[in-house]
């Protein structure tokens, strides 16, 4: 496709598979899901329902900015790496805590 040389490789591949409008919508949903995962794995604390609604609403608004940036930057790929790293950290932390509890 002409004019697609400056688009992120993942988004470009998605655009070739489906229509441009659907590709952007799918990409936006993926960014939202990965942002929520990164937030929950790395930064979430126990909050009330109202505060959680506000935080997730602001995450969705922030994902709009990430969608705009993702046309030329590897935003989804970075969120995937952050999700994997934080997931491994959480698993290792739980393993360490369970081993510590068994020793006591």
Image (cartoon, rainbow, N blue to C red):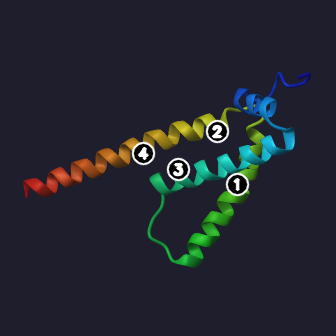
Mark 2 vs mark 4: which is more N-terminal? Answer: 2
Task: Calculate the distance from the C-alpha at mark 4 to the C-alpha at mark 1.
Answer: 22 Å
**Numbered mark located on residue 93 in the image:** none
Mark 1 vs mark 3: which is more N-terminal? Answer: 3
Give neighbour class at mark 3: few <14, some 14-19, many 20+ (Cα, 10 Å).
many
Mark 4 vs mark 3: which is more N-terminal? Answer: 3
User: Against 7, is 98 above or below?
Assistant: below
Camera-nearest label, 1 or 2: 2
Mark 1 vs mark 2: which is more N-terminal? Answer: 1
Q: Secondary structure at mark 3?
A: helix
Horizontal side of residue 80 vs 23, given as left or right: left
Quadrant of the image containing the C terminus: bottom left
Residue at 37% x, 44% y: name it.
89
Residue where numbered disc 2 is placed: 76
Horizontal side of residue 48 vs 24, given as left or right: left
**Numbered mark located on residue 62 in the image:** 1
Q: Secondary structure at mark 4?
A: helix
> Closest to the observer: 27 or 73?
27
Task: Calculate the distance from the C-alpha at mark 2 to the C-alpha at mark 4.
Answer: 16 Å
Mark 4 vs mark 1: which is more N-terminal? Answer: 1
Residue where numbered disc 4 is placed: 87
């Amino acid at each position: 496709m002409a004019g697609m040389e400056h688009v992120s490789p993942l988004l470009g591949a998605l655009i070739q598979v489906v229509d441009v409008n659907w590709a952007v919508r799918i990409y936006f949903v993926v960014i939202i899901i990965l942002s929520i995962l990164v937030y929950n794995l790395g930064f979430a604390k126990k909050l009330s329902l109202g505060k959680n609604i506000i935080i997730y609403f602001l995450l969705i608004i922030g994902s709009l900015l990430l969608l705009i940036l993702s046309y030329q930057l590897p935003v989804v790929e970075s969120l995937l790496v952050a999700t994997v790293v934080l997931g491994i950290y959480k698993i290792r932390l739980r393993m360490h805590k369970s081993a510590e509890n068994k020793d006591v």
